Amino acid sequence: MKAALAAALLLAGTAGAHAQSCGGDFGQFVEGVRQEAIAQGMSQDAVRRATSGLRIDQRVLQRDRAQGVFQQAWLTFAGRMISQNRLDRGRQELQRNAALFRRIEAETGVPGAVLTAFWGLETDFGGFLGDFETLPALATLAHDCRRPELFRPHLLAAIQLVDMGYLEPEQMRGAWAGELGQTQLLPEDYIRFGTDADGNGRIDLIRDSADALFTTAKFIQNLGWRRGEPWIEEVRVPDDFPFDRAGVYAREPRSAFAALGVTKADGSPLETDGLQASIVLPQGRGGPAFLTFANFDIYIEWNNSLVYTLSAAYFATRLDGAPRVREGNPRPGLDADQMVRLQQRLQARGHDVGKIDGILGAGTRAAVRAEQIRLGMPADAWPTSELLTALN
């Protein structure tokens, strides 16, 4: 799910009397959605067709509560997702659609490699769009009282897509969280950024790859993409690097990292300019190292999992000509049960790690780094059995 718009949608979700309703009788909930859609100017026929098949989908609730794929270490996840076949296909698509990508970048500033990486990871270049019925999925999540302020506006937007004649309810299939199309955008984004790239009078993000790619570029541009700037670059970090200065949000001029002995992946000198960057070590000081830039923030807004976002950004660099990452020799991490125990111990020490879920998220990484500093360990935010033992 695109986490970037949660704050904006919170405001949008409070717009009407029905916006805060959730839970309770599902039939009454659906009737409230119908009334709100009609009040927004949608036709009664479109609202009837879009809402007649709404139901609670238990599979959606199960997916929402268990996203175990992000428990994998970065090298494992990236290795699985960025296969040689996917790289080859991505390069073929970049060549096949070269004119379209030039046009998109000229208008939005978003490179074709960035779009192609998302296209490949999200749906295998349109090959698998998801098998969840979008309207019931969004109704399920809007009715569930965990995040109704996020999902109710998207449910209404999905109904609006029917009203606009873009899609019929039975055509709306995608991811469990309501994303649609070849790059998996949510319905409000479909409407807001939808672009008829081929001029056929219809915006179709499901069957028309040109529409999907141009619309995605408009979405990324709106998130703040900086034209002509990098997003990530693999680097080498010396053994004596002050690891407490690493982290996605620890920004410093690139010249500061060069002065600390950070080099390019091939050992050549790093630029000594003022471009703001961060050192990211997805598996600690022994594993791969990246320099991330302001454009990497867009990846985090697309999906706030570092495992996913770093994979998508790295995939884009590979499509753009970068060599395969040096895997290094990362120290063994923790399994899911050990991660849960670690989170519990960190929480007991007063750290905010968020949900105890065994996933190494931003809160857990920050807490790990704080405890490593307290214990005199290298503060690379990578949890190990040594740290777990020290927290007993």
Image: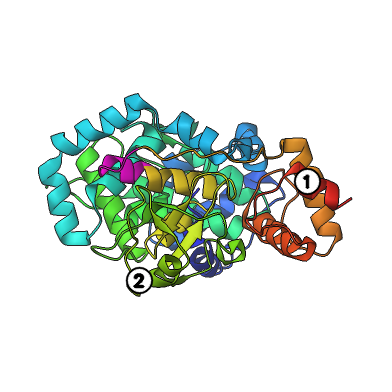
| Amino acid type of the residue tagged 1 in the rendering | Glu
Of mark 2 and mark 1, the one earlier in the sequence is 2
Task: Indicate the position of residue 3 as horizontal and vertical percent values.
Answer: 51, 56
Q: Taking 17 as reference, is 268 above or below it?
A: above
Q: Residue at x 47, y 63 (%)?
A: 278
Q: Residues within 10 Å of mark 2 (few under 14, many from 20)?
A: some
Compare residues 7 and 304 and report the one nearer the observer: 304
Using residue 209 as the reference point, say whether residue 186 is left or right of it: right
Q: Nearer the viewer, residue 150 or 119?
A: 119
**Residue drawn at (35%, 40%) of the image:** 181
What residue sits 71% from the left and 57% below the top?
368
Residue 78 horizontal/vertical position (percent): 47, 36
Q: Which residue is mark 2?
A: 275
As drawn, the residue found furthest toward the bottom would be 274
Q: Amino acid at mark 2?
A: Leu
Pair 2/1: label in front:
1
Residue on which disc 1 sits? 386
**Residue most toward the top?**
85
Which of the colour schemes (rainbow, by chain, secondary structure, one colour) is used?
rainbow
In this view of the protein, can residue 166 be seen by the observer? no
- Vertically, is 361 above or below 137? below
- Magenta segment: does it hold 114? no
Q: State the extent of the magenta-drawn residues as a range.
A: 315-323
The answer to which of 260 and 120 lies nearer the viewer is 260
User: In x, y percent, where is residue 284?
Assistant: 60, 49
Q: Is residue 64 above or below residue 104?
A: above
Choose top left, top right, bottom left or bottom right for residue 128: top left
**Does 293 sit left or right of 113 as displayed?**
right
Residue 316 is covered by the magenta coloring: yes
User: Which residue shows up at 36% across the image and 45% down it?
Assistant: 162
Image label count: 2
> Which labelled disc corresponds to residue 109?
none
